[in-house]
């Protein structure tokens, strides 16, 4: 293909620049990520098993909340990921819009469902955790409320992306919306936080400061790293499928199918 | 278009566009009234739904009026670029040589004059309906005067993104309501503070900051959104 010729002609400047250029080419991307994904799933599986074992079995029960605090090992990493994925989606969306990189459009749009899923998990586990600690499933707590608005932002991006038929136009429109949301997100976050203190005299703190015992903290950190591997593995799997769908009639997909049939 | 406006200068194009859109709006006067009637109907449903207790109504008045204003704005937003998109005028704007940002700003300004300003003018009446104390009535009007332009500005981005869709209206509300959250919080907080006799100037300052930020940023985003939709 064209890209191969361009790569051969130019002298090798920088391995990283070369790598990024190569990743812009669909066959390269498909091939490289195909080799990478199993490793990410494996690392995710091992880390999750280890983290959950430490968190659910080894860690002692909390003196105040009893066993219910263990929901933290799912809730807190999910909540962190929900915000991290939104910002990574916005950064990828920015790159896609400014430099018109198709692979980035695909990656940004593949991020949205994963991020929305993490946000939903954070909301559901948050309200399940609220039942034993606050005595009610839902409190208009600042963090829960911002997570809820974040979920709406994700749903907007996904809804817009699904509503437009033409794939590249859909991706560009949704990327722009993600960027607008990213500009607004800090404002929404702080206004909700401030709204909460305005309407409730004392806000309820879940984690209660940073004096958390290492035996409880380690599983949390392991889980936080594990979900990042999950994100990348899930993201790349989705991106590969989307790439195949879009390039259904291109030569490289045909060659791929021919190889598979052999 | 009127020949007395030269196509050359930016301000000429801006004025011509505002004039044309206002003229179009006033030729369809009944459509002009829809958001206002909608607002009146929605507000009057609240006392029917929760009872006519004056204290209760006064307590929820800022939120109710503001949420009704959000709904009325979103309903009227769809008309912002719709007819220009459907008859191809929007494409002519793009190739006219004038920056699309300026054109978007002119359309937004007209939208506010047609859909936002009536809400501001009507709000004292709504506030009286909802038993809002007189001392916070003026604050209510000021928050609406500062806040409704922000609603039009942010909304224009959503309209730009959904314009090419057949049924963009439902999606539009999903896109813009989360972005309206900070304005709703700050504006209602100002009115509530005024009702309780607390200082409220800082909230108005925040609204002005929001207005300046969205005037400077939103037209660019709306123009970018329109370009994507037209591509």
Image (spheres, coloured by chain):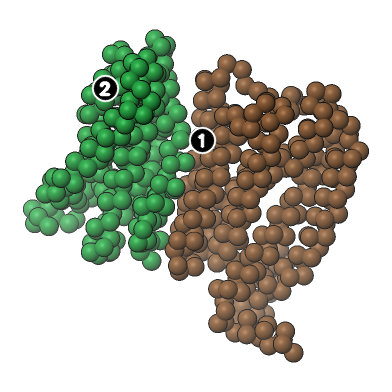
Q: Nearer the viewer, residue A195 or A187?
A: A195
What letter labels the chain drawn in brown? A
Chain containing mark 2: B
To which quarter of the image does residue A234 belong? bottom right
Residue A248 is left or right of residue B41, and the answer is: right
Residue A186 location in percent, x, y? 54, 37
Query: Does residue B90 appear in the picture of this structure?
Result: no
To which quarter of the image does residue A126 belong? top right
What letter labels the chain drawn in green? B
Q: Does residue A215 sit above or below A9 in this rendering?
A: above
Residue A9 is left or right of residue A262, and the answer is: left
Q: Which residue is mark 1?
A: A188
Query: Does residue B111 appear in the picture of this structure?
Result: yes
Residue B116 location in percent, x, y? 26, 37
Q: Helix or strand or loop: what does disc 2 sit on?
A: helix
Residue A79 is left or right of residue A55, and the answer is: left
To which quarter of the image does residue B93 belong? bottom left
């Amino acid at each position: 293909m064209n890209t191969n010729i361009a790569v051969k002609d130019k002298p090798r400047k920088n391995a990283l620049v070369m790598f990024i250029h190569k990743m812009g080419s669909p066959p390269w991307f498909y091939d490289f990520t195909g080799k990478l994904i199993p490793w990410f799933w494996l690392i995710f599986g091992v880390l999750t098993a280890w983290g959950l074992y430490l968190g659910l079995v080894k860690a002692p029960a909390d003196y105040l909340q009893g066993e219910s605090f263990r929901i933290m090992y799912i809730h807190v990493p999910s909540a962190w990921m929900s915000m991290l994925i939104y910002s990574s989606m916005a950064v990828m969306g920015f790159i896609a819009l400014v430099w018109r990189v198709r692979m980035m459009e695909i990656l940004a749009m593949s991020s949205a469902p994963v991020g929305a899923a993490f946000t939903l998990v954070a909301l559901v586990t948050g309200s399940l955790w609220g039942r034993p600690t606050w005595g009610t499933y839902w409190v208009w707590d600042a963090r829960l409320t911002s997570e809820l608005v974040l979920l709406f932002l994700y749903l907007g991006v996904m809804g817009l992306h699904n509503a437009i038929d033409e794939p590249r136009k859909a991706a560009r429109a949704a990327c722009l919306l993600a960027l607008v949301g990213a500009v607004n997100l800090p404002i929404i976050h702080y206004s909700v936080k401030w709204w909460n203190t305005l309407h409730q005299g004392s806000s309820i703190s879940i984690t209660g400061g940073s004096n958390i015992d290492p035996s409880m903290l380690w599983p949390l950190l392991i889980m936080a790293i594990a979900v990042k591997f999950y994100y990348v593995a899930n993201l790349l799997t989705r991106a590969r499928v989307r790439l195949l769908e879009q390039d259904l009639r291109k030569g490289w997909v045909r060659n791929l199918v021919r190889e598979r049939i052999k | 278009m009127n020949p007395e406006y030269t196509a050359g200068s930016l301000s000429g194009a801006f004025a011509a566009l505002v004039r044309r859109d206002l003229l179009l709006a006033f030729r369809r006067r009944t459509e002009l009234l829809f958001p206002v009637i909608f607002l009146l109907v929605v507000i009057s449903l609240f006392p029917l739904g929760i009872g006519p207790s004056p204290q209760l109504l006064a307590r929820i008045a800022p939120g109710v009026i503001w949420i009704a204003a959000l709904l009325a704005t979103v309903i009227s937003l769809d008309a912002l670029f719709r007819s220009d998109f459907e008859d191809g005028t929007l494409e002519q704007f793009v190739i006219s040589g004038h920056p699309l940002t300026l054109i978007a700003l002119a359309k937004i300004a007209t939208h506010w004059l047609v859909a936002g300003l009536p809400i501001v003018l009507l709000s004292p009446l709504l506030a009286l309906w909802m038993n809002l104390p007189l001392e916070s009535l003026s604050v209510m009007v000021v928050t609406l005067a500062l806040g409704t332009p922000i609603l039009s500005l942010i909304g224009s981005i959503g309209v730009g993104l959904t314009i090419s869709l057949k049924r963009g209206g439902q999606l539009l509300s999903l896109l813009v309501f989360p972005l309206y959250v900070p304005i709703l919080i700050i504006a209602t907080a100002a009115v509530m503070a005024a009702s309780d006799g607390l200082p409220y100037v800082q909230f108005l300052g925040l609204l002005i900051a929001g207005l300046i930020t969205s005037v400077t940023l939103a037209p660019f985003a709306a123009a970018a959104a329109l370009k994507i939709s037209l591509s």
